Amino acid sequence: MPRPATEIEAALLREFLAAGDGCVSGAALAKVVGLSRVAVWGHLHRLEAQGFAFAAVHSRGYRLTARPASPSAPLLRALLPDAPPLLYLDSVDSTNEEAGRQLAAGRAAPFIVLAAAQTRGRGRFGRVWHSPPAAGNLYLSFAFRPALPPDRMHLFTLWMGLNLCDLLAAQTGTTPQLKWPNDLYFGPRKFAGMLTEARIDADTIRELVFGLGLNVATPASVWPREVAARATTLAREAGRPLDLNTIAAAVIARVLAASAQFAAGVPHGAIAALWPRHDLLAGRTVTVMQDDETHTGTARGIDADGALLLRLPTGRTRRFRAGEVTLRPE
């Protein structure tokens, strides 16, 4: 069976990444992928159509001079050679929906769905996640068959949020925060959302899909005015350009590692102990909407089961396993 073009191009890119600013000869590239130099040149042309640029240097070969600003499946495969299969789509209704369809069709897990655009991106409660085909956005879903107890699903999202905040802080020098239970913020502005969905059989999570929408360097002009007023990006907060595919590769690696840690067993109470590091709500006045009731009080972190702790005006502390949180403006 012929090798997929993406795998061949990932192997070629791996050689260029290893060379850094240096050159790789056409003969060396041909040997790595087991193709003729003419065939290699054809794959380089395909990569150029995706946004890569190569300079031919006389008697030395080729040098990689530019990478695409949009997500690149071959580049991510080059950066993550040991990652599970990556399904890349130019456009999809929702990466979570596609992951669910692939699981239902029997696709082996884990796998990753990455899209350049979503036509019906969504968050919690069916809310719209604006997903234009603009360089700077990441739309990712991870599919697992984890065999976990259903009561751990809520903790899974919190654990992922903590890991993502730690990773992005280290990658960008910023201070991202978590708005319980599933949003990532810089101060009053949101830059990422998580959505975890599961199929549960009896007392076991049979299938789990973790979705992530992340604004890396999204131009504000692509958002509706009401979204632009309350959204931000990693690059804006870092104050410098960020490479989308480098961030994507780091995020994928961290999510996979964190999911493996979670499946192996995160100690009870460990998430609550780590939560204050990135807690956006701590000590703030918030309103929690649950069913048809609203409760206003002071956020006091989370407990060992991931429930939000709210100190009411009466002095009593109430815990919420679910609900919609509104933060009073400072």
Image (cartoon, grey):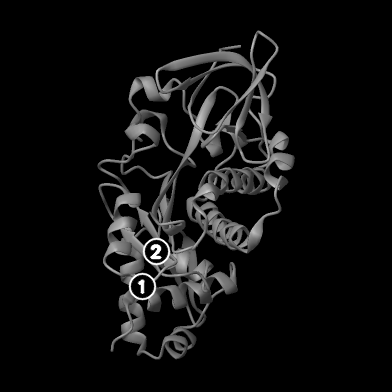
Regarding residue 68, the answer to whether it shows in the image is: no
Q: Where residue 7 sits: x, y (%)?
A: 39, 76
Q: Amino acid at mark 2?
A: Ala
Q: Amino acid at mark 1?
A: Thr
Residue in view at x 52 percent, y 79 percent:
24
Q: Secondary structure at mark 2?
A: helix
Task: Give how far across and how far down residue 299 sits, in percent.
Answer: 65, 22
Judge by depth and name the residue closer to the eye, 75 or 288.
288
Q: Are marks 2 and 1 in contact (CB under 8 Å)?
A: yes
On residue 73, the disc is 2
**In the rendered view, does 114 fall on the left or right side of 297?**
left
Determine which residue is flagged by label 1. 6
Label located before the other in sequence (2 or 1) = 1
Q: Residues within 10 Å of mark 2 (few under 14, many from 20)?
A: many
Q: Nearer the viewer, residue 66 or 163?
A: 163
| Residue 149 x, y percent position in the rendering | 52, 55
Vertical order, 257 against 278 (above or below): below
Residue 102 coordinates in the image, percent (x, y): 30, 63
Q: Residue at x 71, y 45 (%)?
A: 269
Residue at 28 percent across and 89 percent down: it is 1
- Judged left or right of residue 179, residue 220 is left
Q: Is residue 76 visible?
A: yes
Residue 255 lies, with reference to residue 327, above or below; the image says: below
Relative to 208, residue 168 above or below: above
